Image: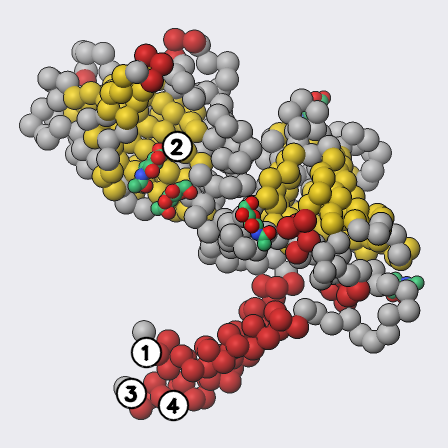
Amino acid sequence: MEVISCWFVRKHRLLYIILVINLFWCARFMSPTYAYDSLDPNGNITIRWDVLQENEDSSKDIRISIVNYQLFRQIEEPGWKLSWRWAGSEVIWNMFGAEATEQGNCSVFKGRVAPHCCEKEPVIIDLLPAAPYSMQVANCCRAGILTSITQHPNKYVSAFLMHVGIADPSDAPPGMPTAFSIGVPGYTCGEAVQVLPTKFTQDQGRRTTQAFATWNVTCSYSQFRASLAPRCCVSLSAFYNETIVKCPMCSCACQDQPKTQCAKAGESPPTMLQLSPNKLLVQCTNHMCPIMVHWHIKQSYTHYWRVKVTVTNLNYIRNYSDWYLVVLHPNFRSVEQVFSFNYKPLNVYENINDSGVFYGIQYYNDRLLQSGKNGNVQTEILMHKDTDFSFKEGWGFPRKISFNGQDCVMPSPNDYPRLPNTAGSFQSQPPASMLLLLFAIHMFLNVDRLYKM
Ligand SMILES: *[C@@H]1O[C@H](CO)[C@@H](O)[C@H](O)[C@H]1NC(C)=O
Ligand SMILES: *[C@@H]1O[C@H](CO)[C@@H](O)[C@H](O)[C@H]1NC(C)=O
Ligand SMILES: *[C@@H]1O[C@H](CO)[C@@H](O)[C@H](O)[C@H]1NC(C)=O
Ligand SMILES: *[C@@H]1O[C@H](CO)[C@@H](O)[C@H](O)[C@H]1NC(C)=O
Ligand SMILES: *[C@@H]1O[C@H](CO)[C@@H](O)[C@H](O)[C@H]1NC(C)=O
Ligand SMILES: *[C@@H]1O[C@H](CO)[C@@H](O)[C@H](O)[C@H]1NC(C)=O
């Protein structure tokens, strides 16, 4: 066995290294698919399960909160769809602030008032904002939409109440279910972990009460698991060169692919109203993306430089509420002023302040309207020129941009607008290439161990 595996490793070592290098090459220039987001390494969504009351008939009153601790990724339409698997014969008698999509088979309660839900694996959705007042609780009724913790101080939590009992009286009282899911592509949830009981303040903070027991379930996102096709691309220009570098061809789809649908600018498509908001009907372009981000290096002053960023919605059937943009650029440690957008630096690593999140100003441009003459939002960013500042070699262009948590396809660095009279070919950043090589060497040294795992 050992002999065979050794032979296998030798034969495939070279192939393996080429593969690793290729993977990293792709990851650098195309949209990366890491299982973990380096811009938000601790980001997670926590489902908190608070047992508020245990009743004599062994039923329980439970409050469930879904808290989005991610720095910039939000839960968009059609919202979360929470589900789990009960261990025994639990049923949900009542629910406030949310509802189960199916009541299920409640025939054991024949002749009595039937519970709200008798499913073994209930699927719970948020109520709509127009829900009757008597069904509402604090932090409910936003159709399952959650902003990130950065964007809104009170819209990143969703909560609902339920009264849970058991169908079979010989069963134990309702317990903690398993197999949690929030029903949004890309997220997986772990097991429930009992934590210190949640405390609630009353009487303006003068009295504190606490839950009987509290469990947390942590859900994390991976773009790889979400495996979504790109929905966004980047185009570039600079005052020092008249070339406008367009989004790469077919970034999101190709026009001539079967099943792709698009409408020419100015032409209003007749089928528009029948399509659901999650469908796409984009303007016909070479890239076919619903969202395009344009980065223009606008001006250079003695100590500062100015960039204009325009986000254009090319989708005819979707307004993006609470949109946000995450940008990585080394000069973001010296952002002097941001016009017309909100800006928050993402200082996840204390000494590298190279990324930030941009989002709209409430009631002004926090909604990115559907394709048309108002279908864009713009900002200008003023940055201080630090010692490493340069217009050379595309330094002024962003390293990475994502819109609503999805990476945008960047043009190839070979195509970036060049300074006039710069000789020689375009170089990619040497430190990154160096890292790549080091990584490959590291993998080479560890390859035997990997194969034996
Ligand atoms: C989830 O995120 C919160 C806030 O960033 C953090 O305190 C907590 O440790 C995270 N949980 C896990 C399991 O990573
Ligand atoms: C509903 O549940 C009862 C007992 O719990 C069972 O006898 C019956 O067959 C079920 N009905 C359906 C349609 O599954
Ligand atoms: C459990 O979740 C709550 C959020 O509702 C959070 O405040 C708390 O820190 C979490 N506890 C642990 C141990 O992750
Ligand atoms: C987008 O918003 C505009 C202006 O508020 C509205 O006229 C339009 O119907 C909305 N479109 C969709 C698809 O919701
Ligand atoms: C990065 O930001 C943090 C918090 O704003 C600050 O403490 C730190 O000094 C900054 N680091 C650099 C290199 O600017
Ligand atoms: C502008 O940039 C393009 C693309 O890199 C390059 O081909 C062209 O020569 C540049 N124009 C001038 C005037 O330098």
Which amino acid does the dot numbered 2 rest on? Ile
Q: Secondary structure at mark 1?
A: helix
Which amino acid does the dot numbered 3 rest on? Glu
Mark-to-mark CA distance, 2 and 3: 49 Å
Which image quadrant is residue 51 in?
top left
Q: Secondary structure at mark 4?
A: helix
Relative to 60, residue 16 above or below:
below
Residue for point 10% across, 30% down: 171
- Counting from the top left corner in percent of width and height, residue 367 is at 67, 28
- Counting from the top left corner in percent of width and height, residue 65 is at 36, 29
Which one is in front, 61 or 394? Answer: 394
Q: Earlier in the sequence, mark 2 or mark 3?
A: 3
Which one is in front, 289 or 426? Answer: 426
CB of residue at label 2: within 8 Å of ligand 3? no
- Counting from the top left corner in percent of width and height, residue 358 is at 64, 39
Q: Which residue is mark 2?
A: 66
Q: Nearer the viewer's eye, disc 2 or disc 4?
A: 2
Q: Which residue is mark 1?
A: 452
Q: How is the image coloured?
A: secondary structure
Q: Nearer the viewer's eye, disc 4 or disc 1?
A: 1
